[in-house]
Amino acid sequence: MKAKCGHVTEKSYADAHGGLCRKCHSNFSFILELEQKYGEDALVEYWYARILTYPSETKEEIVCFINHLIEFYQQKLTDVPSKTNYIKKMLYMLRSIQEPFDIQTLR
Ligand SMILES: [Zn+2]
């Protein structure tokens, strides 16, 4: 079946892991762990580095995963109002990764 992230996976796996495939779920866990261990600045820096270094082939692969993250942080925006500044920064980073695709779609 197709997972929420757009990749093909076993239904039982996706059901148990927030609708993600194995690869995206492991990326997602890594991001949460990084945030927990090294703090919010580290995560912002991580995304900034990735925006600069992602080759466009990889970007296509992760764009649906980015959608999942945007959803996740949008939910957080409502749940954790004290972190609004940080969460908005994250959303900005994530949207910067998406941006080039939107331009390509318009062409
Ligand atoms: Zn996936």
Image: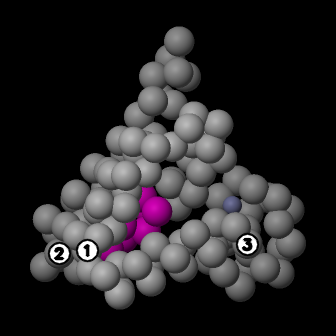
Mark 3 C-beta closer than 8 Å to ligand 1: yes
Residue marked by disc 3: 22
Give the residues in magenta: 69-76
Residue marked by disc 1: 40
Q: Which residue lies at the image location 31% right of the left edge and 82% below the top edge?
A: 38
Q: Is residue 71 left or right of residue 26?
A: left
Categorize mark 1 by other alpha carbons within 10 Å: few (<14), some (14-19), many (20+).
Answer: some
Task: Give me the C-alpha separation between circle 1 and circle 3.
Answer: 25 Å
Categorize mark 3 by other alpha carbons within 10 Å: few (<14), some (14-19), many (20+).
Answer: some
Q: Is residue 82 above or below residue 93?
A: below
State yes or no: residue 72 in magenta: yes
Residue 36, can we see it?
Answer: yes
The quarter in which the N terminus is drawn is bottom right
Q: Is residue 21 above or below residue 36?
A: above
Q: Looking at numbered disc 3 in the image, what kind of residue is underneath it? A: Arg
State yes or no: residue 100 in magenta: no
